Image (tube, helix red, strand yellow):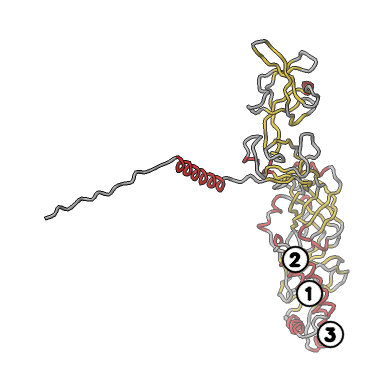
């Protein structure tokens, strides 16, 4: 019997060479670089532009007017003949009231037929709708109900008058008895009653600005009322006021102005108002704006949002995120000198060697100056450091570097690397600063700056735009 031969598998030795090692190192480095690039927050730039910020003050105020409320003197069903916001003269028929409700049923039947509204009536309603849709905004959605009541009153005025004029004989034949009510004073008519009709400035307090408890009643056409029910009110004067809570600093700012420009966003209206400070019943100060026109546009409003417009601050516009602070050494202004070529600014610095003490000129970048000091860099890699002595030109007077102060500024990247530029903020909005233009050592229009300064640790960092 033949012996079985044992076959052993020969293992090839791992043959590593320098080329494979270099390739592997390069491959790992590329993976690491790609990962770092994808995960690292990118440095973006912003181009400086001319701009302005209007620091308008936004408030909510309560409207005060000369209002006279009229009440029902008998029970019955109400029908209106004057629309909301219309001016009525003395002895104008405002509404009628009948005990049985037959007139309301009759008018409702007449209004459903063709010709209830004339072409002129439809044109007026269309104009009212266009005016409302133009001024509408989502922020004032509650004004939809005011518009609804106004349109209902307009339609009721037109249809009721048309029906009464054309069917007067039929009404008499049907034996419908009703009482017409005439306004005792002239003015603008409104059907929204909220209990603030007699509110005056001395009665103002913080409580009247709590809108969570605010409610108003509108008696609709065809509704039954009892004696003493408030039916409508007449606004007897075109003058009106807006009273609003005001901060002390705002009161001081506006107190020097007799008149301020006011913008009402909900009505797309800009007008001038007389500004005064008044004291409420709670002893607190409130702002008061007086107007002598446009009252009719606010006839359905009790509270109103508005802005007091201020002058625009002109300058350079930069994002708030681009601003940072940096510390600098302060050197007296009379220590600055010129180099041997007369072109470079710098300081004479004392240098100590084995041969003794000497004075050398050190070129230095100045970042900012005022009447007393120059601001120079205090990074650790700079030639001038804390403790160094600077010598005044043409004098033996010395100054030891050490006093520091900080400046607001941004990182300019026009040259491809970060350079700190000082700024002076003039005004601020939610996202932007307006800064002074034409500053020495400052920014210019079209300069490129780092959008997010928090990503930069120091000057001299290369940034690829």
Image coords of residue 77 (percent x, y): 73, 76
Q: Nearer the viewer, residue 143 or 402?
A: 402
Q: Is the residue under label 2 in contact with that under label 3 (CB below 8 Å)?
A: no
Q: Give the quarter of the figure containing the N terminus.
A: bottom left
Q: Nearer the viewer, residue 329 or 19?
A: 19
Q: CA distance from mark 3 to mark 1?
A: 17 Å
Residue 438, quarter of the rendered image: top right
In the image, 92: left or right of 146?
Answer: right
- Please tell me whether residue 108 is drawn above or below residue 320 in the rendered image: below
Image coords of residue 234 (percent x, y): 82, 65
Image coords of residue 39 (percent x, y): 55, 47
- Disc 3 crowd rating (10 Å Cα; few below 14, some 14-19, many 20+) is few
- Please tell me whether residue 174 is drawn above or below residue 70 in the rendered image: below
Question: Element type at marker 1?
Answer: strand
Q: Nearer the viewer, residue 354 or 57?
A: 354
Task: Name which of mark 3 and mark 2 comes first in the sequence.
Answer: 3
Q: Which labelled disc corresponds to residue 80?
A: 1
* Residue farthest front in this picture: 2
Q: Nearer the viewer, residue 317 or 246?
A: 317
Q: Which labelled disc corresponds to residue 166?
A: 3
Q: Which labelled disc corresponds to residue 342?
A: none
**Which residue is rendered at x = 87% and y = 57% of the image?**
292
**Which residue is rendered at x = 75% and y = 26% of the image?**
374
Q: Which residue is mark 2?
A: 192
Q: Is the residue under label 2 in contact with that under label 1 (CB below 8 Å)?
A: no
Task: Name which of mark 3 and mark 1 comes first in the sequence.
Answer: 1
Question: Element type at marker 2?
Answer: strand
Residue 369, quarter of the rendered image: top right
Task: Name which of mark 1 and mark 2 comes first in the sequence.
Answer: 1
Q: CA distance from mark 3 to mark 2?
A: 30 Å
């Amino acid at each position: 019997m033949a012996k079985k031969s044992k076959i052993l598998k020969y293992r090839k030795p791992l043959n590593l060479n320098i080329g494979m090692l270099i390739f592997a190192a390069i491959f790992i480095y590329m993976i690491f670089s790609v990962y770092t690039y994808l995960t690292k927050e990118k440095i973006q730039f912003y181009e400086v532009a001319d701009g302005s910020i209007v620091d308008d003050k936004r408030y909510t105020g309560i409207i005060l007017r000369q209002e006279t409320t009229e009440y029902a003197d008998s029970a019955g069903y109400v029908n209106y003949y004057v629309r909301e916001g219309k001016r009525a003269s003395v002895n104008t028929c405002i509404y009628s009231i009948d005990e049985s409700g037959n007139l309301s049923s009759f008018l409702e039947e007449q209004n459903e037929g063709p010709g209830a509204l004339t072409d002129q009536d439809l044109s007026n309603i269309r104009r009212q709708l266009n005016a409302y849709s133009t001024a509408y905004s989502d922020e004032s959605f509650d004004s939809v109900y005011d518009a609804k009541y106004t349109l209902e009153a307009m339609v009721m005025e037109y249809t009721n008058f048309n029906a009464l004029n054309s069917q007067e004989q039929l009404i008499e034949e049907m034996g419908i008895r009703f009482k017409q009510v005439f306004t005792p004073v002239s003015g603008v008519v409104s059907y929204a009653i909220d209990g603030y009709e007699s509110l005056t400035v001395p009665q103002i307090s913080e409580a009247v600005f709590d809108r969570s408890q605010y409610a108003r009643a509108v008696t609709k056409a065809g509704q039954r009322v009892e004696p003493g029910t408030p039916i409508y009110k007449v606004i007897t004067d075109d003058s009106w006021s807006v009273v609003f809570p005001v901060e002390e600093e705002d009161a001081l700012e506006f107190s020097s102005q007799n008149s301020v420009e006011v913008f009402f966003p909900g009505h797309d209206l800009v007008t001038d108002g007389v500004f005064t400070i008044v004291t409420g019943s709670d002893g607190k100060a409130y702002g008061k704006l007086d107007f002598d026109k446009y009252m009719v546009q606010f006839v359905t409003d009790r509270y109103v949002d508005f802005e007091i417009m201020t002058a625009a601050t002109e300058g350079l516009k930069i994002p708030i995120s681009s601003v940072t602070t940096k510390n600098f050494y302060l050197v007296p202004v009379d220590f600055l000198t010129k180099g041997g070529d007369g072109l470079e600014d710098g300081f004479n610095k004392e240098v100590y060697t084995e041969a003794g003490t000497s004075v050398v000129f050190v070129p230095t970048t100045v970042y900012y100056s005022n009447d007393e000091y120059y601001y120079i860099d205090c990074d650790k890699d700079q030639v001038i450091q804390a403790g160094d002595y600077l010598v005044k030109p043409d004098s033996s007077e010395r100054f030891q570097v050490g006093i520091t102060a900080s400046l607001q500024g941004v990182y300019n990247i026009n040259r491809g690397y970060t350079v700190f530029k000082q700024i002076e903020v003039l005004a601020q909005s939610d996202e932007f600063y307006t800064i002074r233009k034409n500053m020495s050592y400052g920014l210019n229009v079209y300069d490129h700056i780092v959008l997010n300064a928090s990503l930069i640790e120091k000057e001299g960092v290369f940034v690829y735009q």
